[in-house]
Amino acid sequence: MLKGFSCDGALKLKFQKSDRHILRTRLMAGIIGIVALLTVLFLSLIIIRVATVALTMTGLSQETAHFQAMSAFTGTGFTTSEAETVVNHPVRKRIIMILMILRSAGLVTIIISLILSFLGPGNETAKLTRLLWILIGVIVLWIAASSRTINKYMARAIEKFLKRWTNLELRDYASLLRLAGGYNVKQIQVRDGDWVAGKNLRACYLPEEGITVLGINRSDGSYVGGPKGDTEVFPGDTLILYGKAEKLQQLDKRRADRAGDQAHYQAVDDEKRQKQQQDMQEQSFKRKRQANLRGEM
């Protein structure tokens, strides 16, 4: 009986150790799953940021580059003229293809990590605690991704890296045009009944509104760079414009009617007042500069 009792005790002890080992293994699997999930999300943000900077260096604006990088990495497809400019550009197309490959690998890893996160031992409270940690980690990553300061330093570091180790065509038009102070580059799709449809650029008087036409994408795929005053605008064309963001938005909504003409005249008057203010600022700058030069002498 003593030997039988010792044997039973040894078996119970063995089973207890085995159960504890299984619990520890499942607990570690849950922790590893949470860490792996947050790591994958962090790397995904880095990948999207790198792709955004790379696309920007090929000539896309930062807003368009970020949208296309997010679209490719998340697998969300949009049939737009911007997407066509990405597909028709060999370097941009290669960047998008890399994002698609990384997306597939990242999606599988996220699914496996989620399974491991909730595989560990414990009751509903323990699982809710793990879910809370995941949510906290996601919020921290989201705050970091939304920080302008972090994005600015990351963009600089990524751009230096890409310049050194890649041969991307460096054409950051957003930086060259100094898109600040509310100025922007916008593409406007011309529709039937739009205020600019059926007119030449000279008749539109867009420069008097503070709007510059950089180019026109024709409906047949041709491109007119640096269009002149006698260049006509047709429905189906896409105008590439530079100016104040609100003025570009108003022009996009303007229709070919009396209200549209009134909006044009109002925009011209607003531009005149803005030019007067800008001239006053320039005169003040010149006076300060001359005073500083006299002080140095």
Image: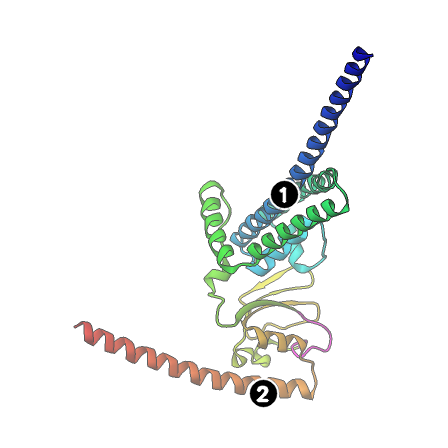
Which residue is nearer to you in this view: 151 or 23? 23
Q: Is residue 181 left or right of residue 121?
A: left
Which residue is nearer to you in this view: 48 or 236? 48
Mark 2 or 1, nearer chain start? 1
Q: Are marks 2 and 1 in contact (CB under 8 Å)?
A: no
At horizontal 63% and vertical 78% (from top left) the residue drawn is 250
Identity, as a three-letter code, of the amino acid under mark 2: Tyr
SS at circle 1 = helix
Q: What residue does disc 1 label? A: 40
Which residue is nearer to you in this view: 88 or 105? 105
Magenta span of residues: 189-198
Quadrant of the image containing the N terminus? top right
Quadrant of the image containing the C terminus? bottom left
Identity, as a three-letter code, of the amino acid under mark 1: Val
Res. 4 image quadrant: top right
The prevailing secondary structure element of the residues shown in magenta is loop
Q: Considering only vertical position in the picture, is 172 above or below 20?
A: below
- Furthest residue toward left: 297
At horizontal 68% and vertical 32% (from top left) the residue drawn is 24
Q: Considering only vertical position in the picture, is 147 above or below 95?
A: below
Q: Residue 159 appears at what percent x and percent y?
A: 48, 49
Res. 2 image quadrant: top right
Q: Is residue 118 left or right of residue 164?
A: right
- Mark 1 crowd level (few <14, some 14–19, many ≥20, 10 Å Cα): some
Q: What residue does disc 2 label? A: 265
Numbered circles on residues, count = 2
Q: Residue 234 appears at what percent x and percent y?
A: 68, 71
